[in-house]
Image (cartoon, helix red, strand yellow):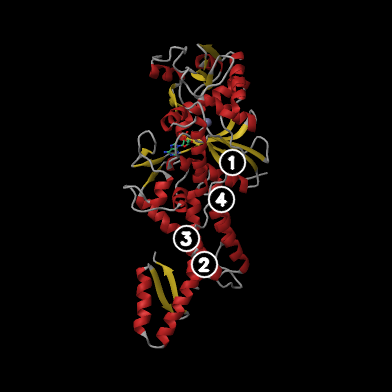
């Protein structure tokens, strides 16, 4: 399997040729949601970014095993192993079993992923279903000398690990700087030898509702551990791609690398990939600051910050117009521009069915195709693909106007280009409103026929009334030598 794909690797901080460990197989792990509340549109951006990466690598012919976990235990409110478990806290608040909370928000997450047309992963493991493996790995790390037990909890010994390994390589942090930043403040964390140490296993207090037996007493696993354990179990000790949002780089991913190396001595991941944040007025969308939108709010328009409702595909198209490694700021203007842009592409696509073919062709479809592949091969540059598709739309308009001609085989290739890049790779689809276009077209044929009859009968009042009513509906009618043509405004 050969491709010209290059991927920006967070670990090496440069773009690297994509060479899987064991081609044609590709292992890809993406940190999934902690299912204690509804995902917001920022979370969705990360999952959409990795959906496109999954789709494109699959399109290239690789056999991808895509693992995206569900965190259903161990994610505490505070990254420094403090605070309540997010799921247990919500369960108390809603007076439900923790697993009811998990099920409720997992279902909601799946619904939203479907709304956005994200493909399901090949495996979606949960942390609570892998407690045995997490206990085993914790024991392995203790046996290898990189973790210690303290009052029923087990902590990863970062300083000890750093004596023989690099710690902080992925996130670009230096252990001395980290130490001086925390000033070794162990307030409330007296069990630890150092403030940099993190929990592999946490002792549960009697009132803690999620707890399991372990060699160290009753407790629950640390959040970072599940991803090390489940990625190793399903993808092997060394696999190709590990992804997540930029905010997970430290401490989550840094701790994952340390755990894997401490357990089996191997660098686990070949390409670390981080998707950048969706922001609102320049600030990261986040539940904790209250600055976020839920997908349901966007789809219904129910928020004072929204001018109107936006469909899932409008939102997806909006996201495609930004590279996954750049921050993307949410705005009504940008979403409305995306809505118009996507509509333009769909209208052009519809018009492709009406184009008459010629002997010769003056549309360079091969070049458009080459440019789309070049864009995707350059670290999944979707905004560049969108720009090429808009160039293709211009060509379609010229074909429609009769200024340019296209052969049968080029026309087929042009249709395939849209199918491949717009639908298969960028994962857009027709929504019910777009699917209605067939119906709209049929109705418009009838209306324009009636208008033609009215004109022929010199009933100009009627023909004008039809045109003006359509204009109110934002449909323009133009009389050409081949008869009346209609289009949506813009
Ligand atoms: P969480 O459930 O908080 O672990 O987040 C799930 C995923 O969403 C992680 O990969 C986060 O990095 C990502 N994420 C959280 N906030 C944002 C945001 N504002 N923009 C993009 N991704 C985000
Ligand atoms: Zn993770």
- Between 175 and 456, the residue placed more toward the observer is 456
Please identify, in this view, whether the residue under mark 3 or under mark 1 is nearer the observer: 3
Whole-Å distance between the Cαs marked 3 and 4? Answer: 22 Å
Q: Do tag 3 and tag 4 residues touch (Cβ < 8 Å)?
A: no
Whole-Å distance between the Cαs marked 1 and 2? Answer: 33 Å
Residue bearing the label numbered 1:
121
Residue bearing the label numbered 2:
438
- Image quarter in which the N terminus is found: top right
Furthest residue in direction bottom, as rendered = 457
- Image quarter in which the C terminus is found: bottom left
Whole-Å distance between the Cαs marked 4 and 1? Answer: 15 Å
Please identify, in this view, whether the residue under mark 2 or under mark 4 is nearer the observer: 2
- Between 161 and 47, the residue placed more toward the observer is 47
Whole-Å distance between the Cαs marked 3 and 2? Answer: 10 Å
Q: Is any atom of residue 75 visible in this view?
A: yes
- Between 22 and 134, the residue placed more toward the observer is 134
């Amino acid at each position: 399997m050969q491709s010209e794909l290059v991927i920006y690797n967070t670990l090496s901080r440069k773009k690297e040729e994509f060479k899987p460990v064991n081609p044609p197989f590709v292992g890809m792990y993406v940190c999934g949601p902690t299912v204690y509340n509804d995902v917001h549109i920022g979370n969705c951006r990360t999952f959409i970014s990795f959906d496109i990466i999954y789709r494109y690598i699959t399109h290239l012919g690789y056999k991808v095993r895509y693992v995206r976990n569900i965190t259903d235990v161990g994610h505490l409110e505070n990254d420094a192993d403090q605070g309540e478990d997010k799921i247990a806290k919500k369960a108390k608040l809603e007076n439900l079993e923790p697993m009811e909370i998990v099920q409720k928000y997992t279902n909601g997450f799946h619904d939203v992923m479907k709304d956005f047309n994200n493909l399901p992963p090949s495996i979606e493991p949960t942390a609570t279903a892998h407690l045995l493996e997490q206990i085993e790995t914790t024991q392995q790390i203790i046996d290898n000398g990189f973790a210690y037990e303290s009052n029923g909890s087990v902590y990863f010994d970062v300083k000890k690990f750093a004596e023989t390994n690099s710690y902080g390589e992925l996130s670009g942090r230096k252990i001395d700087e980290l130490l001086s930043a925390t000033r070794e403040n162990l307030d409330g964390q007296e069990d630890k030898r150092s403030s940099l140490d993190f929990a592999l296993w946490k002792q549960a207090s009697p009132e803690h509702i999620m707890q399991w037996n372990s060699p160290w007493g009753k407790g629950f696993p640390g959040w970072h551990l599940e991803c090390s354990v489940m990625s190793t179990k399903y993808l092997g000790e060394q696999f190709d791609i590990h992804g997540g949002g930029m905010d997970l780089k430290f401490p989550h991913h840094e701790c994952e690398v340390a755990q894997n190396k401490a357990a089996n001595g191997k660098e686990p991941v070949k390409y670390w990939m981080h998707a950048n944040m969706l922001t609102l007025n320049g600030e990261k969308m986040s539940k904790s600051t209250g600055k976020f939108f839920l997908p349901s709010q966007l789809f219904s328009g129910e928020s004072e910050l929204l001018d109107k409702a936006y469909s899932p595909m409008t939102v997806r198209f909006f996201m495609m117009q930004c590279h996954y490694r750049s921050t993307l700021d949410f705005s009504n203007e940008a979403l409305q521009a995306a809505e118009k842009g996507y509509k333009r592409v769909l209208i052009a696509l519809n018009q492709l069915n009406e184009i008459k073919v010629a002997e010769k062709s003056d549309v360079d479809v091969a070049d458009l195709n080459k440019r789309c592949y070049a864009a995707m091969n350059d670290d999944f540059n979707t905004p560049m693909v969108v720009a090429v598709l808009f160039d293709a739309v211009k060509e379609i308009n010229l074909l429609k106007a009769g200024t340019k001609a296209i052969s049968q085989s080029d026309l087929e290739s042009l249709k395939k280009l849209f199918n491949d890049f717009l639908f298969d790779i960028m994962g857009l689809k027709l929504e019910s409103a777009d699917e209605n276009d067939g119906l709209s077209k049929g109705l418009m044929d009838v209306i324009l026929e009636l208008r033609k009859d009215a004109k022929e009968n010199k009933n100009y009042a009627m023909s004008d009334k039809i045109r003006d009513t359509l204009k109110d509906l934002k449909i323009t009618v133009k009389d050409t030598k081949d008869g009346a043509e209609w289009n949506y405004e813009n």
